[in-house]
Image: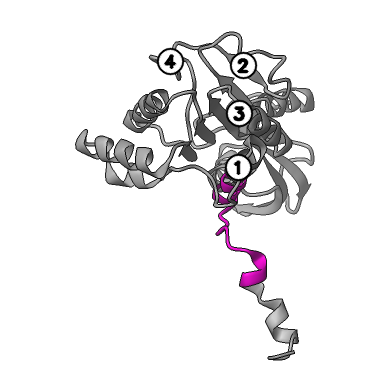
Amino acid sequence: MTERLTLARALEHARAALDGGEAMASVTVLSGGSPGAPAPGERLCVWAHRHEGTLGAPNLDAAALRIARGALAHGTRPLPHEIAEDGVRFAVYVEPHLPPPELVILGAGHVARPLCRLGAMLGFRVLVLDDRPEFATRERFPEADEVRVPDFSDPFRDLRIGGGTYLVLVTRGHKYDFEALRDVLRRPERPAYVGMIGSRRRTRAALESLVREGIDDERLRAVHAPIGLDLRGETPDEIAVSIAAEIVMVRRGGTGQPLRDRERVAERWIRPGG
C-alpha cells in the first residue's frame, strides 16, 4: 500500500514545482463527514501521470486524483471540494502548484534589457539567449533567471519549450530571427506566444517563405509579427513596453482595446454638445 505523505515531503514537491519543475496539485483533507473518511491532514501530491501519498483507500485516492488533475488541466485557483465516494463523504482542499511562465528572449540588445526587467516584474522566469558573450552577461541582465550563450545555428538546444513558454525573437539581424522562428514552428511543441521583431516588409517576406516551406497556416497565424501592440513606441524602453503589453494580453485573454472605449463611461454622463 502507498505510504502516507508527510507535510515536509509535500512542501518539497510544491517548492520544486514553483521553481520551474513539473506542475503539481496538492490535495489535503479538511474534514471527514462520515465513517470511513480519511483524517484531516491526510494528503496527496498529484502530477499529470503519477501521484504520491494516499487517503487510505484506492477508491478515495481515485476520486481525489480526478479532481486534482482537473485543477491542473484548467489551471484553477486553490479551492475546497467535497468528495462523496461509496458512501464516504469528506472535504478536501486542492491547490495547484504551477511553475512560473517562462519568457525566453532571443537576443541581448537594446530592447532585450528593458524587456527582461519588465518580464521579471510581471512574474516570468526570464531566460536571455545571445551568441555574443560580451552581450549575454549577468551584468547586463541582473533580473534574468538565466543567461546563456548558445550557438545561433541551434539556439534552443536543451531548452524545454511548452505551453508556458513565451518566445521573443529580437536578435541583431533578421536572418537570425527568421531561422529561429522556422525552428520553433517546425517543433511539435506549441509555445504560448511567439513574437518576432521586424518591419512589415520583412515580416511579410518571412511568412511567405515559411508558407512555401509548408509550415502549417494555423501555426503561422499564431505568430505575433511585427511584435507588440501599436503604441507608436520609438525608444527601446517604449518598444519593450509594447511587447510586454501584448504578452500580458495573450496570457490573460485580453483584447488590447482601450478600456475607455469598451466601457464608454463618459458617453453615459456627458450631455451631447456639452
Q: Nearer the viewer, residue 81 or 163?
A: 163
Which residue is disc 2 drawn over?
147
Between the residue at mark 4 and the residue at mark 1, the CA separation in whole angstroms equals 27 Å
Which circle's residue, 2 or 3, is located before the other in the chain?
3
As drawn, the label of residue 6 is none
Specify the farthest residue to the top: 133
Asked whether the beta carbons under mark 2 and mark 3 sit within 8 Å of each other, the answer is no
Q: Is residue 145 left or right of residue 211?
A: right
Which circle's residue, 1 or 3, is located before the other in the chain?
3
Q: Amino acid at mark 4?
A: Phe
Which residue is disc 1 drawn over?
234
Q: Amino acid at mark 2?
A: Val
Which circle's residue, 1 or 2, is located before the other in the chain?
2
Q: Judge the density around disc 2: few (<14), some (14-19), many (≥20) Cα neighbours within 10 Å.
A: many
Within the magenta stretch, is there residue 151?
no
Which circle's residue, 3 or 4, is located before the other in the chain?
3
Q: Residue 104, how many percent across, how many down? A: 55, 28
As drawn, the label of residue 112 is 3
Q: Judge the density around disc 4: few (<14), some (14-19), many (≥20) Cα neighbours within 10 Å.
A: some
